[in-house]
Image (tube, helix red, strand yellow):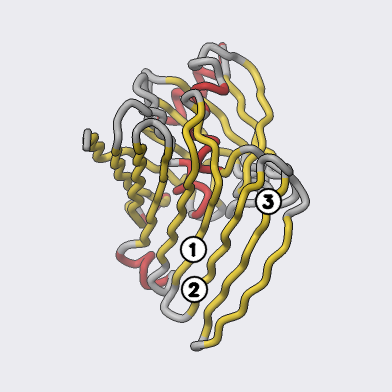
């Protein structure tokens, strides 16, 4: 569920100071299995924070041991683009807390990763530099996607890189479909309007070896619906926007 819920936080409405988006997540025959809430806050068009919390509900909550996932990207706004300084992912269950903190050094083109794991009241910590450099984390990448795709005028395939995507090099493949591919994508999502993308996170998610996601982004830049295809035994995972609040603080 991790990457799907991350992708659902696609927001590019940078004129507002605070945006809160809530999504429901469905899993094939089980129906609704979780919720995700994403918050974007920008101070004076200079500093930003993006946070997301995803929770399993009902039967899925029992199976996952009360699993909660939290992600946060923090950094600067430069010419309308989010430039991360820190990215953190936290996974919590009833028995374990795992945290990964990434610190960006854009000048030296290096990223330090700090791992902290707590289990049975025992905490372990390690740190290292990851083997690649990327200008984005997975959250800032999708906040910036509108600009990377030239305000959705771009058609075809584009390769980008982000911490939180492929573990080897952070690669993310974006495809803006046309013709029959676009028609099929609209049919799969059950939607007619918006900007449609196919995204490969390039890591195995459930039965999807490359993490293939179908996305519909509305004209304001918000992800209206996302779909992870053909999960083994259960079918498709879907995520849909159910609430959107904008606050001018």
Task: Give the x, y percent position of residue 56.
Answer: 37, 61
* Tags 2 and 1 touching, CB below 8 Å: yes
Query: Mark 2 or mark 1: which comes first in sequence?
Result: 1
Q: Where does label 2 land, which residue?
A: 97
| In the rendered image, the vertical position of residue 136 relative to residue 16, given as above or below | below
Q: Residues within 10 Å of mark 1 (few under 14, many from 20)?
A: some
Q: Residue at x 46, y 52 (%)?
A: 72
Spot occupied by residue 79 in the image (x, y as percentages of width and height): 50, 23
Q: Quadrant of the C terminus?
A: top left
For residue 216, side relative to residue 157 (left or right): left
**Tag 2 or tag 3, which sits nearer the N-term?**
2
239 and 115: which is toward the camera:
115
Query: Marks 2 and 1, Cα distance to the nearest angstrom?
Result: 7 Å
| Residue at (49% x, 77% y) in the render | 96
Residue at 45% x, 20% y: name it. 195
Q: Earlier in the sequence, mark 3 or mark 1?
A: 1
Q: Position of residue 242 (x, y in %)?
A: 26, 40
Q: Nearer the viewer, mark 3 or mark 1?
A: 3
Front in this rendered view, residue 200 or 235: 200
For label 1, the SS is: strand
């Amino acid at each position: 569920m991790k990457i799907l819920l991350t992708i659902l936080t696609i927001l590019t409405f940078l004129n507002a100071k605070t945006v809160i988006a809530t999504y429901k997540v469905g899993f094939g025959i089980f129906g609704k299995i979780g919720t995700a809430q994403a918050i974007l806050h920008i101070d004076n068009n200079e500093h930003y924070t993006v946070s997301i919390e995803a929770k399993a509900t009902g039967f899925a909550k029992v199976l996952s041991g009360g699993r909660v996932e939290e992600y946060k990207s923090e950094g600067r706004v430069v010419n309308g683009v989010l430039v991360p300084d820190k990215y953190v992912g936290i996974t919590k269950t009833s028995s374990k807390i795992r945290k990964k903190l990434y610190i960006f050094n854009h000048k030296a083109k290096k990223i330090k990763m700090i791992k902290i794991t707590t289990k049975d009241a025992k905490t372990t910590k390690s740190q290292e530099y990851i083997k690649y450099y990327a200008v984005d984390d997975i959250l800032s990448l999708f906040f910036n996607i509108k600009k990377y795709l030239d305000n959705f005028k771009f058609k075809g395939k584009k390769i980008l890189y982000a911490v939180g995507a492929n573990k080897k090099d952070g690669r993310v493949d974006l495809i803006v479909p046309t013709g029959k591919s676009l028609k099929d994508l609209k049919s799969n999502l059950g939607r007619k309007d918006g900007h449609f993308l196919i995204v490969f996170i390039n890591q195995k998610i459930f039965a999807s070896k490359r993490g293939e996601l179908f996305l519909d982004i509305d004209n304001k830049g918000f992800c209206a619906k996302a779909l992870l295809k053909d999960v083994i035994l259960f079918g498709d995972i879907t995520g849909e926007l159910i609430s959107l609040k904008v606050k001018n603080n």
